[in-house]
Structure formats: structure tokens, C-alpha cells
Image (cartoon, coloured by chain):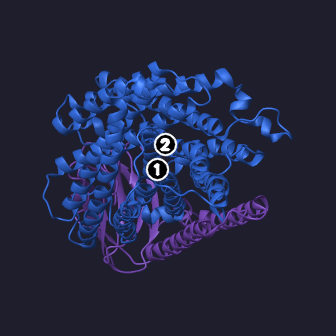
């Protein structure tokens, strides 16, 4: 059973995530305003904000998923409070170091910090080691947390049970709850990509301290970067899906979901596809072996099968012609799944090599990943935050339609500007657009307006949820 | 081509919204007597099979159109060496010396001749993206230090073409560009 300590630390995670989210959205809006020529930032400020925005977003939605999974995992196994606290402390320290490197040191190599860009000093010299160290601190905290959660699962379930392999036979004696299966599969992916990040950082530091006697291979470093970056961005979505499998039926007043042979198969296959789909980030590196390029496209396509055929289909089956107790929580889950599907469609289109040839590094790329993050994963986490805080301080839900409408209209307009920009060949990551691509600035201005609406909706969620989380933080055992 | 992709996406987007809205509305109208989808396992199987076949067709049609196979059986009549360096491109008819990267003042290509761009970088990762005069991205590859990416292309229309860097490379990334002419 959950403890008061777990409840409080989960509240702290939620407040931190929402606070940093608001800051990161503001940075994003400033970027679009600059691209729209409504404000004027220096390129250094713009790219510094871009670096902060990208890494902060990835970090917060990863820890949001982890905090939710940790909280719900307590229903099945005892989790380590110390590991949770350790991850929290290192996340705070890591984010402060990261922001120091970008805001004060003016480090601006982007969230991908593609080798060897961090070594081409265009900022304070100390900012490069500080930036790389901040990633090391974050990675260490998250790795310890992930390993701890997995170890706790494996104390109760054998490896084959954790992977739900017994469900491939008729009449399995033990049922692996879907939440355990998905958490296990996701944690393996998380640990794999964090280990890749550690290797990447070690290679960076060896070259940094070698005084020129050691030089890394750019292609290997790029593969490691995207194995880490792509996988962690995907896994944070799957953490959200684990939460949906656990909570959607419960809050909807429907029978709890069970693991079946096809659910077990789908999630086991997902692990393979998730770990090999990252090759699609290197399609335009023609020196990458062709076989890996083809694997990238096929794995990206196949990854959609278990996702669409099992998870999305299960949500639709659960809702179709069934009486559902609709609340803000399951509405956010449901709309989030739709956002995830739509972002996935944009992703599969871009994961087609012949399409990537004319879409790579245009605005199509941020279009699709912002869709399944801003309109998918964020909604999964908001649903959990809302459900979690409502358990202890329930307030009557008011003006849900208004809140959701602002969120959806803001999100849709902001995202459509990205998609149209991609189709118009507008490059991504440009602080300002060249005069021969005038559509870029127009779309950026429109996007900034809609993103501001999205921000308003998020601020409403932020105040409602944080208020309740602050009450949880100040509560005593007697009042709980 | 990009517009067709956008239309495909918008079509799929509309279908997704219609399906989710329809399913949501069906739950709102549902009573305690409703029992959801009849035989969901069978529907799931057919849904997966159709999706698998569609993706299989897409993969088999699109993979052969990947840029790695462009004009693979032909010999290029023209080779253009490209070296990217923060924040400019050097284009040359001859191999480029990294210690003294100097290129031609102007590169002129012929309509419909097979050109091979041999693209590398002398510092960080860059993008080498070719835009036509309408501002449409028509071809690209990456410029990576230590490697040479070979892009083969035939220009079917004469005119001025721009080269833009499409891989973020630092504070002046947005102004890193070059051009050439096709006659």
C-alpha cells in the first residue's frame, strides 16, 4: 500500500513537472515569436532557449511518467522511497546545472548536442563540461530509479512472469497484470537507452580530456545519440500507456483489463521495435549501412501494429457502446490516445525513407513529435495528476469542456502550423527564416498565438492540480 | 510531393477524429443493457491484418524509392565535391583540401545530367539540402565529419537552386547557405 511519504514525493514531482512545463512552454512561445519576427532575440539566446526547451520537456515528461508508474506500482510491489528521493534530488540538481549552462554559460548545441558540436566552443568554456555533467547527473538519478523499480518487480515476479510469457500457453496459472508487463518492457528500454547515454557521455569526456589524442567517430556518436534520444522519448509515452492500462477501466467503472496472449505478444514485440526504430533518425546519413536504414523503416512501421492493434483498439473497444463514467481523468486519457495516434501517423509518414528525403529536418519533424507529446503524453500525465490529486482533495469538476476546448484548439492550431510548415519545406531549428521562405514567419506567428491558448489551458490545470498537491504536502498522517 | 503527403496526413487525421468521436458518442448513448463491441477479438484480428497489409504495401512500394538507390546503375557525368564548414559550403569540381578549403566561385550544372554530390564536413554535422527556385526542398543528405555522403540527382528544370543547411550547427546555422545554377 502506498505510504504518506510516497504520496508527498509524488506531489512534489507533479508540482516540479508542471512548473517546469510552464517555463518550457514560455520558452517555446518565445522561439515561435522570434521566428515570426514579432520579437527579436539574438541567435545565441534563441538557440540557448531551444536547447533548454527540448531537454527540459524530455526530462519532465519522462519523470512525470516514472513518478506515476512508481506510485501505481506500489499496488503490486513495495517500491524504494530512497531511489525515488535520489532521482528527485538528482533531477533538481541536474536541471539547475543544465539551466546554468544554457542561461548563464550560453551553451546552445541543441538537445541533440550532436558530436562534435559541444566541442566547438561558441559559449563560456565551462558550459560544455557543465552541460555534459548535468546530463550525467540526470542519467544517474534516472538509471538508479529505473533499476530499483525493475528490481522490485523481479522480487515478486520471475523474469518470464514479468514478460508475461506464461500467457502464450493455454490457461496460465499466474496472471501478470498488464501494468506490470508494460512497466517491465518500458523499464528495459529506459535502462538500455540510459546506458547508451552513459557510454555517449564517457566518449565525450574521454575526447574532452585527451587534449586531441583521441577523436570519436561521428557516425557512432550519432547512432548513440539517437538510440538514447529516440528511445527515451518513446519510452516516456509507454510509461503513460502503463498508467492508462491501470487506470482507464477503473475510473470509467469498467472491468479491469487483463493480460491475454495477444497483449503479451504485442508488448514483447514492442520492445524489439522500440529499440531498433531509432535508425530512422539517420536516413539522410547515406554512409550508414543500408540494412540498418531498411530496419529503421520496417521497425518504425511494425511498432505501430501492437500500438494500434492492441492498445488503441483496446481503448476503443472499452468505450464503444459501453456506459462509461466520463470524468476529466478518462477524457484526458481518451483524447490523449487520439493525439498519440495522430502524432503516430505523422511519424510513420516521416519514417518512410522516401518521404524523409524531403521532410527530414523540416518543421514536419517537430510537428509529429509535438503532437504525440503535447496532445498525447502530456494529456496522459495530466490525467494521472488530476486523478491522483483528486483522490485526497476532491473538488467538483467545473468547466471541463471549456478547459479541454482551449487545450484542444490551442494545441491543434499550434501543431497544424508545424505540419503546414513541413509541407512548405520550412527548416526546423532556424532562429529566423530566410526571405525566400516567407511562409515560415507567418506560420510561426500563428503558432505562437495558438500556443498561448494552449498555455492558458495548462495554467488552469497547473493551478487546480498544484493547489491540491500543496495540500497533500502539508497534510499529516491523521488527516490522510 | 510534400503537398500530397500533407493531404494524406490530413485525410488520416480526419478519419482518426471521426472514429474517436463516433466511439465517444456511442458510449454517451449507451445504456446498462449495451454490451459493447460484438466479438472484439475477431474485429481486432481483421483490423491488424488490414493494417499489416497496408503497411506491407507501403514498405514494398517506398523502400525501392529510397535515395540510396537513385541512378545506382549509371555512371555520373558530373561530380561536385561539397565541404561544409561553420557556416558556409565550399563547392568544387575537384576534391577539396581540408587545410585549404577553396571552391569554385560558381557551379553550373546541365539539365538532366547525372550529378553526384560528394558531401562531407570539416567540422560539425551539417545538412546539405537543395531547394528549387519555388522554395521547395527537392533533395538532401547530411554532411558528417570523417564521412562522404554521395547524393545522385538529375535536375529536370533549369534555373537557380539554393543549398540550405538543415542540420543545426551553431549560432549562424540559419544563414549557412550556397547556390548553383542549372542550365
**Residue designated by label 1:** A377
Judging from the image, what is the letter of the chain drawn in purple? Answer: B
Residue plotted at (30% across, 41% down): A20
Residue plotted at (34% across, 74% down): B132
Is residue A108 visible from the viewing direction of this image? yes
Disc 2 is placed on an element classified as helix
Judging from the image, what is the letter of the chain drawn in blue? Answer: A
Q: Is residue A209 left or right of residue B71?
A: left
- Mark 2 vs mark 1: which is more N-terminal? 2
For the residues labelled 2 and 1, the Cα–Cα distance comes to 8 Å
Q: Nearer the viewer, residue B19 or A165?
A: B19
Residue plotted at (35% across, 25% down): A90
Provide residue B141's location: percent of width, then percent of height.
42, 57
Q: Chain of mark 1?
A: A
Is residue A140 visible from the viewing direction of this image? no
Q: Nearer the viewer, residue B153 or A17?
A: A17
**Residue designated by label 2:** A236
- Quadrant of the rendered image containing residue A170: top right
Amino acid at each position: 500500500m502506498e505510504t504518506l511519504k510516497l504520496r508527498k514525493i509524488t506531489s512534489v514531482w507533479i508540482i516540479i513537472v508542471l512548473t517546469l512545463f510552464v517555463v518550457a512552454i514560455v520558452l517555446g512561445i518565445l522561439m515561435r515569436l522570434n521566428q515570426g519576427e514579432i520579437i527579436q532575440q539574438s541567435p545565441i539566446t534563441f538557440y540557448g532557449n531551444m536547447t533548454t526547451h527540448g531537454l527540459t520537456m524530455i526530462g519532465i515528461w519522462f519523470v512525470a511518467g516514472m513518478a506515476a508508474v512508481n506510485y501505481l506500482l506500489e499496488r503490486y510491489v513495495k517500491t524504494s522511497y530512497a531511489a525515488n528521493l535520489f532521482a528527485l534530488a538528482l533531477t533538481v540538481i541536474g536541471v539547475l546545472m543544465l539551466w546554468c549552462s544554457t542561461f548563464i554559460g550560453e551553451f546552445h548545441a541543441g538537445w541533440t548536442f550532436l558530436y562534435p558540436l559541444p566541442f566547438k566552443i561558441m559559449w563560456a568554456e565551462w558550459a560544455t563540461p557543465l552541460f555534459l555533467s548535468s546530463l550525467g547527473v540526470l542519467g544517474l538519478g534516472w538509471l538508479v530509479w529505473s533499476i530499483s523499480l525493475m528490481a522490485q518487480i523481479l522480487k515478486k515476479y520471475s523474469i518470464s512472469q514479468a514478460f508475461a510469457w506464461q500467457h502464450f500457453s493455454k490457461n496460465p496459472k499466474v496472471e501478470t497484470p498488464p501494468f506490470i508487463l508494460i512497466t517491465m518492457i518500458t523499464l528495459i528500454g529506459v535502462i538500455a537507452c540510459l546506458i547508451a547515454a552513459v557510454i555517449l557521455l564517457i566518449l565525450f569526456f574521454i575526447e574532452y580530456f585527451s587534449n586531441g589524442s583521441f577523436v570519436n567517430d561521428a557516425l557512432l556518436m550519432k547512432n548513440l545519440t539517437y538510440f538514447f534520444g529516440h528511445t527515451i522519448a518513446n519510452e516516456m509515452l509507454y510509461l503513460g500507456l502503463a498508467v492508462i492500462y491501470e487506470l482507464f477501466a477503473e475510473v470509467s467503472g469498467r472491468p479491469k483489463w487483463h493480460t491475454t496472449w495477444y497483449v503479451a505478444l504485442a508488448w514483447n514485440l514492442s520492445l524489439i521495435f522500440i529499440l531498433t526504430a531509432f535508425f530512422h533518425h539517420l536516413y539522410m546519413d547515406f554512409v550508414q549501412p543500408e540494412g540498418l536504414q531498411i530496419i529503421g523503416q520496417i521497425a518504425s512501421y511494425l511498432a505501430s501494429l501492437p500500438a494500434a492493434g492492441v492498445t488503441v483498439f483496446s481503448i476503443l473497444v472499452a468505450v464503444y457502446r459501453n456506459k462509461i463514467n466520463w470524468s476529466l481523468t478518462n477524457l484526458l486519457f481518451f483524447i490523449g490516445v487520439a493525439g498519440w495516434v495522430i502524432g503516430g501517423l505523422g511519424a510513420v509518414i516521416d519514417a518512410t525513407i522516401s518521404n524523409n528525403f524531403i521532410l527530414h529536418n523540416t518543421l514536419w519533424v517537430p510537428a509529429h513529435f509535438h503532437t504525440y507529446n503535447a496532445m498525447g503524453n502530456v494529456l496522459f500525465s495530466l490525467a494521472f495528476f488530476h486523478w491522483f490529486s483528486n483522490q485526497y482533495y476532491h473538488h467538483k469538476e467545473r468547466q471541463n469542456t471549456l478547459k479541454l476546448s482551449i487545450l484542444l484548439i490551442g494545441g491543434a492550431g499550434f501543431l497544424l502550423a508545424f505540419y503546414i510548415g513541413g509541407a512548405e519545406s520550412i527548416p526546423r531549428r532556424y532562429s529566423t527564416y530566410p526571405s525566400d521562405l516567407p511562409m515560415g514567419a507567418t506560420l510561426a506567428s500563428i503558432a505562437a498565438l495558438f500556443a498561448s491558448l494552449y498555455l492558458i489551458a495548462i495554467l488552469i490545470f497547473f493551478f487546480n492540480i498544484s493547489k491540491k498537491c500543496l495540500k497533500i504536502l502539508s497534510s499529516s498522517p491523521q488527516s490522510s | 510531393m510534400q503537398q500530397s503527403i500533407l493531404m494524406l496526413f490530413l485525410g488520416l487525421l480526419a478519419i482518426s477524429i471521426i472514429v474517436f468521436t463516433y466511439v465517444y458518442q456511442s458510449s454517451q448513448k449507451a445504456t446498462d443493457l449495451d454490451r459493447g463491441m460484438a466479438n472484439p477479438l475477431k474485429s481486432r484480428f481483421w483490423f491488424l491484418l488490414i493494417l499489416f497489409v497496408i503497411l506491407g504495401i507501403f514498405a514494398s512500394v517506398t523502400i525501392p524509392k529510397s535515395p540510396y538507390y537513385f541512378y545506382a546503375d549509371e555512371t555520373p557525368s558530373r561530380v561536385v565535391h561539397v565541404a561544409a564548414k561553420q557556416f558556409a559550403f565550399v563547392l568544387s569540381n575537384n576534391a577539396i583540401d581540408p587545410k585549404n578549403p577553396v571552391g569554385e566561385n560558381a557551379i553550373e550544372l546541365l539539365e538532366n545530367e547525372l550529378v553526384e554530390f560528394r558531401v562531407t564536413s570539416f567540422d560539425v554535422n551539417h545538412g546539405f539540402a537543395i531547394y528549387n527556385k519555388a522554395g521547395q526542398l527537392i533533395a538532401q543528405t547530411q554532411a558528417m565529419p570523417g564521412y562522404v555522403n554521395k547524393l545522385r540527382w538529375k535536375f529536370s528544370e533549369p534555373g537557380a537552386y539554393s543549398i540550405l543547411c538543415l542540420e543545426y550547427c551553431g549560432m549562424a546555422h540559419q544563414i549557412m547557405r550556397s547556390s548553383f545554377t542549372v542550365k
